[in-house]
Structures are given as C-alpha cells and as structure tokens.
Amino acid sequence: NSDGANKLSKEDQELVLSLPRVKGWDFSFLYQYQGFWCPSRYLHGILSFQRHFQAKDTDIVLVTFPKSGTTWLKALTYTIANRSRYTLENTPLLTTPSHDLVPFTDLEIYSKNQSSILEDLPTPRILATHLPYASLPQSIINSNCRIVYLCRNPLDQFTSYWHFVLQPADPVSIDEAFEKFCQGVTMFGPVWDHELGYWKASLEKSNNVLFLKYEDLKEDIIYSTKKLADFIGCPFTNEEEAQGVIEEISKFCSFDNMKNLQVNQTGKVAYFGMETKAFFRKGKVGDWTNHLTPSMSKRLHNLMEEKFGESGLMT
Ligand code: A3P
C-alpha cells in the first residue's frame, strides 16, 4: 500500500489545490497538471520523478497512453534486451508480470519512494511512464537515452480502457465515459495531445524517439520486433535471424501466449496489487466496432481528424 508514501508535502498540497479539478469517469476527480489530467494519488510520484530522476544515456524509456499495449511493449523490450541473460525457457516473464519487471518509474518507483532501486538496475535500464513528452523529466530530454512510444487508435484505446475501468458494483455508462473522453478528460488525456507530443518528437529527434503503432505491431510483429531491437541498441545478428530468434520472441510475447501463462491467468501485479488477467482482454484491432455506436465512432473520428490535422498521424 503506497498511501503513506503518496502523502504530498505541504507545498505540493497547495500546488494540487491550485490545479483545475473535474469529476472524472475513471477516477473520482482528475487534476489538470501541465495540460494533462491526472488523479491526485499519482502526483507525488510524478513530481518526484520530474524533480529527481537522473537519466543515463543507455536508458530505454517506454511510454504509452494507458491501454495502448504497455504490457506487450514491456514484455517485448524486456525479452529483446535481456536475451543474452535469459532464454525463453527460463525468462522471468514466465513467473513475473511484465509490469513488475518494468515498473512505472513515476507511478510506482517514485510514488513509493523507492528511487534507490534505480541505481541497481542492470544496463540498459528499462523504464516506463505514461507522462506526455512535454512533462518528461528534463534529464531524459537532455540525455541521449532512447524513448519508445507505442500509440494505439483512440477508438480501440477508449474501448479497452472503458472495459478496464468498469466495476460491476459501480458501473460507468459508456456514454458518460465517452463524453468525457472526447473532452480529453481521462487519465493522462487528452489522448491526441499525448500522441502528437511524441509524434513530433519522433520526427525531430528520430535517433532518440521511436514512434510505434499497436496496429502495425499486430500486422507485422517480426518487422516491428526487429525495428525495436535496432532502435534500443540490441540488434539481432544474422545468425539469430537465421535461427528464427525474432519469430520466437515475437511468438513468446504474443497475446495468446502471454495471456495463457499461469502468471497472467491467476497472478497479481505486485506493484499495483491488481490481477494480471485484467491486462489481457481481447488484444485485437477494431474491437471498438462492437462497443461504439456509429454516431460515437463518427464523432471520435472527426475529432481525431481535427486534432491530428496535417500531422500525418491519421495515416
Ligand atoms: P484490449 O482491452 O483491447 O484487449 P495496456 O497494456 O497498455 O494496459 O493495454 C492493454 C491492452 O493491450 C488490452 O487491449 C490487452 O488485451 C492488450 N494486450 C495485452 N497484451 C498484449 C499482447 N501481448 N499482444 C497484443 N495485445 C495485448
């Protein structure tokens, strides 16, 4: 339980009180901090991460908007980066959720005042956050570390998140959730600002920021796994390619394989105290068609066109 560690200093409490606050659909209240919406319980970890984190040039920072495939990206990156240490027969992923092997640096490590563990992580350190690009610690921006951003079509991301948040005892209607989502009021939202921030950074600093799409990973995971490995500085050798290592890793990290591991059927993520199975629902592209009405999808589509504009993100 991180409640104790989450206690904000008097100064930060005043900061929180000065922030715009709205009723959320995913959390009782969301606070607008640096342009994104955030529950107050996360602010301690975020502020601490922003103020104190020291990046190393060898760091790999995984970033996602929630429900865009974080669990998958963590598993893939962990497996690629640690393949000389572990085989697929003895990888810790068989017994430990990817969220515990690559915990969120701000929401978990700094939130629990455990930043000292960062010093002991093997190189390259694999870190994770949901923060928008503009809110990353300055040390990350100034360093030469590599940032991998995984985005997902907001229609599917919203559908996934709505299912994730849904509590049978306290259901939120999809209409209410959707309305707020379209207004940008959702944890770390608005989603378009989040995606655009990393998209622009990936164009400006292509050596440091890799922009991936969930849909592209689903379409051609071999290509994406190779691209990811190259980008994080752990490229596959010709020999590995010939031996089918890329296929094996891709298959190991696939939805069907991961979902069926005992640890992801009955385990818990130690850090969040949440059941691992909540992170594996359908793992498909286009499930929004089963949950959003035509008018909802049209509205969101129009909003995406308006927000993404000429950026190139709609293509
Ligand atoms: P769905 O709810 O659409 O099924 P996150 O990891 O960011 O919380 O995102 C969770 C979403 O990613 C869920 O989407 C989940 O099923 C999907 N997912 C989890 N592991 C996956 C994997 N190995 N391959 C593809 N999708 C995966």
Image (cartoon, helix red, strand yellow):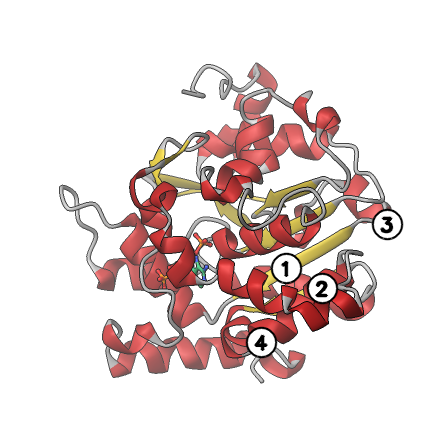
Say how many tags the image has: 4
Question: What amino acid is at disc 4?
Answer: Phe
Q: CA distance from mark 4 to mark 2?
A: 18 Å
Mark 3 vs mark 1, CA separation in Å: 16 Å
Return the disc, 4 or 2, that comes first in the chain's sequence.
2
Number of residues whose C-alpha sits closer than 10 Å to that of mark 1, classed few (under 14), some (14–19) or many (20 or more): many
The quarter of the picture where the N terminus appears is top left
Establish if 237 lies above or below 37. below
The kind of residue on which mark 2 rests is: Leu
Q: Residue furthest left?
A: 169
For label 4, count other residues whose C-alpha is less than 10 Å away and answer few (under 14), some (14-19) or many (20+): some
Quadrant hosting residue 310: bottom right
Q: Using residue 117 as the reference point, say whether residue 100 is left or right of it.
A: left
The residue carrying mark 3 is 144
Residue ID at (56%, 51%): 88
Mark toward the viewer: 4 or 2 = 2
Residue 190 visible from this viewpoint: no
Mark 2 highlights which residue?
210
SS for callout 4: helix
Residue type beneath disc 1: Tyr
The residue indicated by pointer 1 is: 149
What residue sits right under mark 4 in the picture? 308
